[in-house]
């Protein structure tokens, strides 16, 4: 009996380890966060009292993000941004009250599918905002044609998302934030200006591996030697074995592709081991959340140069409005979702309303037509359903995030 | 050679971490014969208790650790009464489901109470780096190593020389016989869970300053702790020590020289290999702790 129990426990441990530790190509995202047994769909989690006159049927929007696990900052931040935007719109667009429904995908592809299906089939949403992690987004994309609901993607950067969207691919998926192709190319230029060799440590999922697939050749083409490429699982506890490899290779730079939760752990161990390489980052590292979480450890991210979809200072009006509403500094995911809701979704609903019916199909058609002026540049979707908002280069210096450059990514500007 | 030494030191400190987490699990496993899949959540509660006391209310670290242990031990008592005792005489499948359910409830409750974003709790020891030649190590890691060894020593003395410890050993050998001889097995079970929970909280309070704590923290660490318990031998706390350090060193060396992404799989494969050669574990036998 005991041997049977022992073997069962051993088998469970091994299977779970292989599931969470195996490097996964394509859409499977290994994660150290435990999967919840089912998606928790919270009905109508964003309730904004309509201040404008609502005379037409509601437009339901689903927000599928990670609200739990190590990447939960994506969901929490996104919620804040969409709520602020909806409040500024008075809860109504073109006479339609707007309702937002949240669903947790825990940055997990299987749960992403459950989340989207639940939002569409149970909550009857007309549009999806999602899905946060690249692996979740890629998984959710597979459902969109079947469910006839468009998805607007922000903060997912895997090159596969761009390749698989729009003409010749998934015509229901629209990408707001620029992907790894642009981010990697821009960042590698900054790296090449500063160092001659670099080690890369990235998330072991589509985001991290997608980023590295662009960074590595781009860096090499600019004459930068890539000494190490290593991957870690989200929620990593001990990165010291990798960091010792970096210490042994002794590059001039260290490039981290991560979110701030993991970045804090990794950089803490980076400093512990006495590493002094010039720091670079891709992902949400140099953020107010990072500074808040490391306020007792000044200097942890000192000097890190981070390429970001958004940074404080790019839109002072938004910064002030967000801080007034939430009593905290805005977060990249908050900002991105704010602009999506405030400008893109608004424009799409207005355009779709002209057809007399706002549903998944009319919203999809509307998204292909709209062109909107925003503080992040003029946004419209090209043939790959890709928009081109401005991006930022920031550094962390003396406990502050300093905006260094704003990059216009729109090829037509 | 220098890098090898550093990897080995990493492995030893990692093993100490696993050993500290596994100790309480092994104790419960050995005495009550129950696989507690919620052990990681007790570890997580220890981390949050530390943050509440040390970070939010500025209680001195040592006192915060002790209070965290007391608090989570109380939770362990409640856990034993509400979750464990009703299923103690049921099949191991029922026990497994019960503790897994408790684990999910606790982790989701933690999300509602503290949110899902990880919190950190740096201490003076975690910020102080000891440099010995080429070796750099945070003093907090040395504390984990010292406390892990001290905890094992304490537990060994406790179970050998105290009346309660003797009862725990008896119960691990034959629960039914204990009832016949008038040993209150419910009381022994309670004490076991209190000690096990306190040890989990101790692990949480010592390890959180080195990493982060979130509602998801305990789960993966618990898997490693299970591996150490299984590999060390059912209810063999001595075996747990050796197994935990072996796992830590294997992981550090594999992650450092072969592949970091597959280091966890390597550790579990070593566990399987050990079980193939010695199905009862390294120090395992059918007879108690």
Image (cartoon, rainbow, N blue to C red):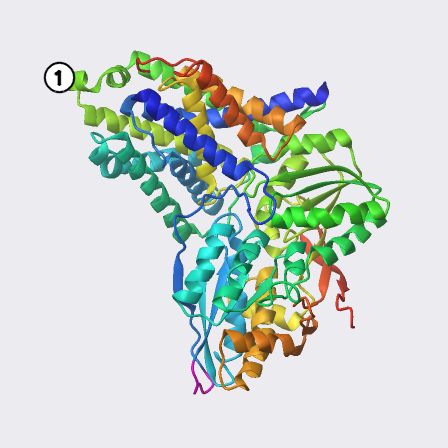
Residue A218 horizontal/vertical position (percent): 79, 49
In this rendering, position of residue B132 left or right of residue B126: right
Residue B197 horizontal/vertical position (percent): 35, 32
* A54 magenta-colored: yes
In this rendering, position of residue A369 left or right of residue A341: right
Q: Nearer the viewer, residue A181 or A235?
A: A181
Query: Label 1: chain?
Result: B
Q: Is residue B220 visible?
A: yes
Farthest residue, direction front: A168
Residue at position x 21%, y 20% from top? B175
Pointer 1 residue: B180
Q: Is residue B62 visible?
A: no
Residue at position x 59%, y 44% from top? A262
Disc 1 crowd, CA 10 A, few/some/many (<14, 14-19, 20+): few
Instruction: Kindly indicate the quadrant of the structure image that contains residue A251.
Output: top right
Q: Secondary structure at mark 1?
A: helix
Q: Which region is colored magenta?
A: A51-57
Q: Name above or below for residue A373 compared with residue A278.
A: below
């Amino acid at each position: 009996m005991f041997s049977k129990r022992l073997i069962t426990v051993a088998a469970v441990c091994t299977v779970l380890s292989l599931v969470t530790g195996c490097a996964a190509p394509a859409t499977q995202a290994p994660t150290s966060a435990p999967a919840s047994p089912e998606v928790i769909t919270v009905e109508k989690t964003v309730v904004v009292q309509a201040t404008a006159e609502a005379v037409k049927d509601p437009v339901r929007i689903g927000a599928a993000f990670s609200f739990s696990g190590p990447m939960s900052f994506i969901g929490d931040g996104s919620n804040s941004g969409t709520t602020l935007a909806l409040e500024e719109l008075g809860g109504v667009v073109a006479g339609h009250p707007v309702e937002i429904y949240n669903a947790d995908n825990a940055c997990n592809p299987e749960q992403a599918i459950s989340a989207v299906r639940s939002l569409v089939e149970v909550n009857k949403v007309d549009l999806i905002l999602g899905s946060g992690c690249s692996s979740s987004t890629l998984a959710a994309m597979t459902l969109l044609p079947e469910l006839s609901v468009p998805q607007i993607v922000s903060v997912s950067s895997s090159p596969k998302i761009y390749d698989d969207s729009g003409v010749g691919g998934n015509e229901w998926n629209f990408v707001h934030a620029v992907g790894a192709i642009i981010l990697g190319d821009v960042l590698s230029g900054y790296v090449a200006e500063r160092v001659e060799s670099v080690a890369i440590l990235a998330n072991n999922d589509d985001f991290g591996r997608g980023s590295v697939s662009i960074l590595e050749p781009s860096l090499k083409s600019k004459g930068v030697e890539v000494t190490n490429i290593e991957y870690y699982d989200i929620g990593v506890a001990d990165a010291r074995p990798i960091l010792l490899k970096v210490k042994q290779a002794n590059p001039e730079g260290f490039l981290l592709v991560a979110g701030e939760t993991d970045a804090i752990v990794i950089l803490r161990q980076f400093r512990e081991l006495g590493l002094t390489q010039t720091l670079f980052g891709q992902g949400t590292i140099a953020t107010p959340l990072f500074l808040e979480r490391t306020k007792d450890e000044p200097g942890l991210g000192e000097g890190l140069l981070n390429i970001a979809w958004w940074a404080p200072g790019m839109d002072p009006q938004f910064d002030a409005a967000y801080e007034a509403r939430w009593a905290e500094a805005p977060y990249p995911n908050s900002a991105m979702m704010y602009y999506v809701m405030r400008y893109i979704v608004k424009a799409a609903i207005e355009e779709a309303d002209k057809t007399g019916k706002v549903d998944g199909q009319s919203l999809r058609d509307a998204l292909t037509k709209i062109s909107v002026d925003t503080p992040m540049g003029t946004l419209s979707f090209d043939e790959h359903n890709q928009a081109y908002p401005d991006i930022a280069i920031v550094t962390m210096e003396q406990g502050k995030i300093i905006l260094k450059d704003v990059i216009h990514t729109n090829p037509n500007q | 050679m220098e890098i090898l030494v550093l990897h080995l030191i990493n492995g030893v400190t990692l093993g100490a971490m696993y050993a500290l987490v596994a100790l309480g699990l092994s104790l419960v496993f050995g005495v009550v014969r129950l696989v507690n899949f919620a052990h990681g959540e007790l570890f997580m509660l220890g981390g949050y208790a530390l943050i509440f006391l040390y970070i939010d209310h500025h209680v001195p670290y040592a006192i915060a650790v002790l209070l965290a242990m007391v608090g989570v031990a109380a939770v362990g008592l409640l856990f034993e009464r509400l979750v464990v005792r009703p299923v103690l005489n049921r099949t191991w499948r029922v026990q497994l489901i019960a503790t897994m359910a408790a684990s999910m409830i606790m982790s989701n409750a933690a999300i509602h109470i503290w949110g899902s974003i990880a919190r950190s709790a740096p201490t003076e020891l975690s910020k102080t780096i000891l440099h010995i030649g080429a070796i750099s190590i945070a003093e907090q890691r040395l504390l984990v190593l010292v406390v892990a060894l001290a905890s094992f020593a304490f537990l060994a003395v406790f179970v050998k020389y105290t009346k309660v410890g003797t009862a725990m050993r008896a119960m691990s050998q034959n629960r039914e016989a204990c009832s016949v001889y008038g040993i209150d097995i419910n009381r022994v079970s309670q004490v076991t869970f209190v000690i096990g929970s306190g040890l989990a909280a101790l692990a949480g309070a010592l390890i959180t300053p080195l990493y982060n704590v979130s509602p998801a923290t305990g789960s993966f660490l618990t898997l490693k702790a299970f591996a150490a318990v299984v590999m060390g031998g059912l209810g063999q706390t001595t075996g747990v020590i050796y197994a935990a350090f072996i796992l830590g060193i294997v992981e550090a060396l594999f992650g450092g020289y072969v592949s970091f992404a597959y280091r966890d799989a390597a550790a579990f494969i070593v566990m399987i290999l050990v079980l193939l050669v010695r199905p009862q574990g390294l120090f395992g036998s059918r007879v108690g702790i």
